[in-house]
Every structure is written in structure tokens, then in C-alpha cells.
Image (tube, grey):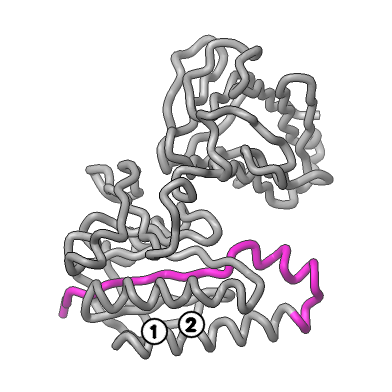
Amino acid sequence: MEKPLAVLFVDIADSTQLYERIGNVRAAALAEATLLHLRRCIEQNNGWVVKLLGDGLLAAFPTADGACRAAGTMMDCQATFGLQLRIGINYGNVVQGHGDLYGDACNVAARVEALARPGEILATEDFTQRLSADLRKRTKPLHNVAVKGKTAPVRIHEVRGDDVPDDAVESTTIAFSLSDMRAQERGTLTLHLTYQDRRITLNRHNPRLTVGRDEASGLRVLSRQCSRQHGMFDFSRESFIITDHSTNGTFVRPGESPPMVLRRDSAKLVGTGLIGFGAIPQDEAQDHVAAFRVELM
């Protein structure tokens, strides 16, 4: 039987890098302690843990307010544990099974969590509309995103704490994340990026690059249109994927085709083209534009 619930997915961001950085034993202990704390946050707000998901979990709440308060408390623990979380929340009808939840509301919540950048809470409009007035003031509408299995786009909101300044929301970084690729008999797929006087090659030996205004970024794009954390690139199923996490959007112009805008959505990079971080790319000389080339080497 279906029942309406607030569905929350939370995940420890970049847990693979955490295990590599501090070792398996310490990372496993830290993850276990974090998940225990997350469980307490959930139960203190009248929710329950449905199941564990590796370095994350799925939780449910009878009310949107309970899920929102739990998510805020979870984020408060990041500094304590020295890591970052990603949280996605939705509200809708679900079917409760043995140790799991089923239904469209769960699928959408999982998609929203995947779009969140480290340290960010994202929620659907179906969820935010059910918040009390005080908690709804902590949300900021972002963009519509396409969700697999949904005919209409889903409106996404960011959920902020009271102590988060507005400019922290509008500042965003492109995280270029690539899985370790396997060299095939016919060669290795490689992504070449050119930005001003820099040339960067991404492949299985150099799998990760951060891009944005933040000075800690691997590639800094010092443009007002670009956010400090702008999005993410991944190597998935033998393809390079770019995912936007920004306020102004990411514009991809493949070859001579018209540019397409990504707002909290993803696209596959093929061949050659330009990427505009926050504005439409006209040529490679613009301060917010990078050129890309995908080839088999």
C-alpha cells in the first residue's frame, strides 16, 4: 500500500579518495562513526533509516519538516568528522517493502542526491512546498532538471542553513571527476582541455581535475560568470560526461552546432567544441571558455 513520505538520500562525498588518503582501516572507522551520527540525526527528527548504501543511507520521514531539520543537523557534523556530505530529498507516495522503499518518489530523490555537490542539500519542489513557512525561507529555487522516467522536468531547490550567506550559494566549482579508465586494445580515450595558456590532458593516469573560481581548483577560471563550484565531469561507460552544478549554467557548443545549456543536468562530450562556464561560448579567447577535444590515443 502506498503512503506519502519524505525520502532522503545522504552520501559521504568522495569516499573513494578518503580511503586512498587515510587508509582503509581509518576511513572505514570514520565512515562508520559518521553513519552512526547520521542515524541519530534521523531518529531525533522522527525518521528512520530504511537501509545503508555503502558510505551513505536511505531514510524516510512522515513530515517534510522532520527531513529538513535532520538534513541541516547532518551538515553540521561535517567539520567534526572532516568530510563532506551530499543530500537529496523528495516527497511523494512510496511503497514500503522489507528493508527498502519503492516508487517514483525514491527514484527522484536518488537523482537529486546525485546532482548535489559536496556540502549541499538539494530538494524537489514537491518537498519544499510541504515545509512550514520558516523552513521554506531557507530554500532557494534553482533550475528544472530532466529525470529518467519522468515526462516533465523536476524543479530543484537548494536548502540552506540560517548561517549560510547568499554569496556562498551563488559561488560554485567545476569538479571534473573521472573514473579509472581501462585501456582497450584499440587505445585509451582521452580528453584534452585548453584554457588560455594551459593545456590539460585527462586519461586513466590523470583521472581528476577541479575547475572554478576557487583558488584551490586545479584549473581556475577567473570569470564573474563562473562559480567557485560549477559542476562535474565524469568518465562513465566509455564516455566523458559533464554535469552542471552552477547558478548560471554551463554551455556546451559541440563543433559548429548551436550551444546547449546545462542547468543541474548532464551531457556527453564528443569530438571537439567549446565549454562556457556561465555564459555562451563564442570563441576560445573568452575568459570563461575552455576548448575540448575527445580522442582515442
Coordinates of residue 262 in the picture (x, y in percent): 43, 34
Element on which disc 1 rests: helix
Residue 6 shown in magenta: yes
Q: Judging from the image, what secondary structure is the residue with disc 2 in?
A: helix
Asked whether 51 or 222 is in front, the reply is 222
* Residue 110 visible, this angle: no
Q: Amino acid at mark 2?
A: Leu
Asked which quadrant contains residue 44, the reply is: bottom left
At 37% from the left and 89% from the top, the residue drawn is 43
Q: Which residues are magenta?
A: 1-26
Determine contact: label 2, label 1, CB under 8 Å: yes
Residue 277, horizontal then vertical, whole percent = 54, 29
Residue 166 in the image: above or below residue 54: above
Disc number placed over residue 288 in the picture, else none: none
Amino acid type of the residue that numbered disc 1 sits on in the rendered structure: Ile
Q: Nearer the viewer, residue 39 or 253?
A: 39
Q: Quadrant of residue 121?
A: bottom left
- Which residue in the protein does label 1 denote? 42
Residue position for label 2:
38
Q: Residue at x 75, y 71 (%)?
A: 19
Q: Residue at x 65, y 48 (%)?
A: 177
Circle 2 packing at 10 Å, graded few (<14), some (14-19), many (20+), is many
For label 1, the crowd category at 10 Å Cα-Cα, with few meaning under 14, some 14 to 19 and many 20 or more, is: many
Give the image location of residue 173, x and y in percent: 58, 43
**Which residue appears at 30% of the width and 57% of the height?**
139
Horizontal arrangement in the rendering, residue 156 relative to residue 175 (left or right)? left
Which image quarter is the C terminus in?
Answer: top right
Q: Position of residue 188 (x, y in %)?
A: 78, 37
Within the magenta stretch, is there residue 151?
no
Q: What's the distance in space between the residues labelled 2 and 1, CA to CA?
A: 6 Å
Of 42 and 24, which appears nearest the observer?
Answer: 42
